[in-house]
Structure formats: C-alpha cells, structure tokens
Image (tube, grey):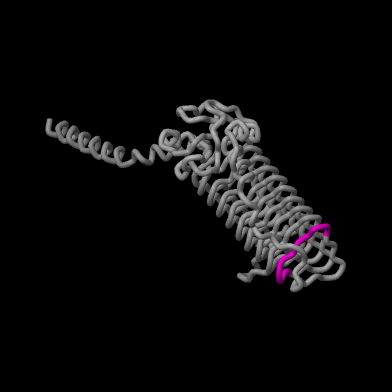
C-alpha cells in the first residue's frame, strides 16, 4: 500500500488532522507499527502508547487526540482500520474452486452458479446450495438442507438433515448444526430418548465459530437471527431462539427453549437455564449464571445473575468481610469486659 493519508481518509470517511500528504506504506497494531505504518486507537487504555508508537499516523476518535502525530478521526476507528486491512491484505486464503472429484453428491441436489466444493464432502439428497457458496473439505450436509448464496463453510463442519442456512453465513471448522437436542424422559431410573424432530434455521450474515453445537428443536425450530455472531465452543440447546445482531462469546451455554433478544451480549462462559427470556440490548457479563428472565436494556452479572451494580456492591461487601469479622471480635471483647466490670460492681 502506497497512499497518502488524505487518500486513506477518503476511503474510510475520516477527517485528517495534521499533514495529510505523508505516504502510508503499511498498517499494523499500535505496539508493532514501524515507520510508514498507519495504526489505530479504539481503547482509551492504550492512549499512553500514542506517544511511543513508531507509526506514521493514527486512526482515532474525536475524543482521543493526545499526540503530535497526524491523525485520521473517525466515528469508529476499529472499523475504519479493518477496512484498510481488507484493502491491503492479499486474498490468499486458497478457497476451493470447482467441484472436487471425490465429492459424494446425492440425488436431486441443486448447485448454484460458481459453487465450490472441496475434497471428500458428502452431500445428501435434495440439498440446495446457492450461488457462490464455498464448502471446504470433509464437510457433511444432510438431506433436504438449504444453504444460501455466498456462504462459507470451513473444513469438517457437520450440517444435519432439514437445516436452513441463509446468505453470507460463515461457519468455522468442527461446528455441528442440527445435532439432537438433549431430551430424555426418566422413568424408574431409566432415561428414555425423546425424538428431536424439529430443525435449525440460521438467518443471513451470521458467523459461527469453531466447535459450536446448535441443537435441532424437539418440535418446530432452533433459530439464529440475522447478523448474530457466535464465538468458538458455544452450546445452543434445542428450541433456543436468538434474535438479530447479538454477540455470543466463547464457552457460553444456553439451555433449551430460552429466547435471546436482539443486540444482546452474552460474555464468555455465561450459562443460561432453559425457558427464560433475555430482553433486547441486555448484557450478561462473563461467567454469570442466569436463572430467570433478564429485562431489556439491563446488565446482569454474578451467580445467580443480578443487576450489575447489585453484584458490584455485594462483591465490595465480601471484600470487607475480614475487617468486619475483626471488628465484631473487638466489639465482642469490649462487651465481655463491660459485663465483667458491671458484675464486679
């Protein structure tokens, strides 16, 4: 990349502060940047690095401008930097091209234009795959499954029967979609399997990390809403419904029939019991255990999960327990001394 700072600012809808004619030859993180690089600052805790970085220029927000270096000011520095990286990074992922000769394709399969399928993929009967979708080696796609256009499925993904996947979906390696929900009826100490005859519906623009499991519904469908992003190692139970543009971070577990609203954040290792509702725009902090409904526009934390500030006050009180214990001991001794004096009188 050899562009002036002014040219880059136009590409990311930013405003230049300082010398806009300097030449930018690369991009890197604020610690790793060298001469000629452009970097970014999106987190205020890295402000001290603005004076130390060797970068030629920094992308930042309007409220962070504590440097003599040339700046590009944008509303979202992280997104602007991502656009720059996309422009300068060569597309060398090596996606499969065409249909490998080892692919096993069932009857009545419909493949759209420019579909690419890697080695040893197995596709069941009556499957539909949309234009421009890419399926890497070793994947399994069950019968009557529908996959939209420009969807990218990495190696060793298993998609069971009768699953619906939208357009521009990304699914990373090791993920299993449509496995049986965990349903058993216990009678006289024996666990009898309850058939899981529903499906899974994944909307457009969803990204699913590695080794995620999304169970099929007992009846009807498990749903992942448009634009939702799911991190690695997440478990989503049967009949769960997740709304649009939510963030589900690593190792979250969601039990069956829970409803998660739009723009919800479930931070790492949060656990949700079944049959509850998480309202729109709610945030569940890391390692929280949610046992009841969470209202919209609230933050909860702890185990059991409570309103965030309540948990903070409880934690602060717990930190003071040793002091409180010593104080009680001192007061107890003083009371005993007073009682002894009164008795002697």
Residue depicted at x 78% and y 57%: 147
- Quarter occupied by residue 227: top right
In the image, 334 versus 40, the foreground residue is 40
Q: On the rendered image, what quadrant is the C terminus found in? A: top left
Query: Residue 148 is drawn in which quadrant?
Result: bottom right
On the question of residue 195 being in view, the answer is no
The answer to whether residue 118 is magenta is yes
Q: What's the residue at 30%, 42% (across, down)?
A: 322
Q: Is residue 92 visible?
A: yes
Residue 336 location in percent, x, y? 20, 37
The percent position of residue 81, horizontal first and vertical second, equals: 58, 40
Please report the residue visible at 61 percent of the width from the left and 52 percent of the height from the top. 254
Q: Above or below — where is 2 with respect to 186?
A: above
Question: How many numbered marks does the figure carry?
Answer: 0
Frontmost residue, 115 versus 26: 26
Q: Quadrant of the N terminus?
A: top right
Q: Position of residue 240 (x, y in %)?
A: 68, 52
The reply to whether the magenta stretch includes residue 327 is no
Q: Quadrant of residue 72?
A: top right
Indicate the position of residue 122 as horizontal and vertical percent values.
75, 70
Extreme residue in the right direction: 108
Q: Provide the residue span drawn in magenta.
A: 112-121
Q: Is residue 345 left or right of residue 285?
A: left
Nearer to me, 76 or 258 = 76
Q: Main secondary structure of the magenta part?
A: loop
Above or below — where is 317 with respect to 158?
A: above
């Amino acid at each position: 990349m050899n562009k002036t700072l002014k040219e880059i600012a136009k590409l990311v809808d930013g405003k230049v502060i300082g010398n806009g004619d300097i030449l930018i030859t690369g991009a890197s993180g604020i610690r790793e940047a060298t001469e000629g690089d452009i970097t970014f600052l999106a987190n205020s805790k890295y402000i001290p690095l603005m004076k130390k970085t060797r970068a030629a220029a920094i992308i930042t927000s309007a409220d962070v401008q504590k440097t003599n270096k040339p700046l590009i000011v944008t509303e979202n520095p992280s997104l602007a930097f991502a656009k720059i990286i996309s422009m300068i990074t060569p597309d060398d992922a090596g996606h499969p091209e065409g249909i490998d000769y080892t692919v096993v394709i069932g009857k009545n399969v419909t493949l759209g234009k420019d579909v690419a399928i890697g080695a040893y993929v197995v596709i069941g009967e009556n499957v539909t795959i949309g234009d421009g979708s890419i399926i890497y080696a070793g994947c399994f796609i069950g019968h009557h499954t529908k996959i939209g256009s420009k969807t990218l499925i990495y190696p060793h993904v298993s998609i069971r029967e009768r699953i619906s996947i939208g357009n521009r979906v990304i699914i990373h390696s090791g993920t299993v979609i449509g496995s049986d929900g965990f349903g058993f009826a216990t009678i006289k100490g024996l666990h009898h399997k309850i058939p899981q005859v529903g499906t899974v519906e994944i909307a457009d623009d969803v990204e699913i990390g590695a080794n995620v499991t999304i169970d099929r519904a007992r009846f009807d469908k498990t749903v992942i809403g448009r634009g939702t992003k799911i991190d690695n190692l997440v478990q989503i139970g049967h009949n769960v419904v997740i709304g649009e543009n939510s963030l589900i971070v690593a190792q979250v577990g969601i039990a069956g029939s829970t409803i998660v609203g739009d723009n919800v954040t479930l931070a790492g290792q949060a656990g949700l019991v079944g049959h509850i509702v998480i309202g729109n725009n709610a945030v569940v902090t890391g390692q929280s255990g949610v046992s009841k409904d969470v209202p919209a526009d609230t933050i909860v934390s702890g185990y059991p999960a409570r309103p965030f500030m309540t948990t903070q006050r409880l934690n602060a009180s717990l930190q003071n327990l040793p002091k409180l214990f010593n104080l009680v001991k001192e007061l107890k001794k003083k009371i005993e001394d007073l009682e002894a004096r009164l008795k002697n009188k």
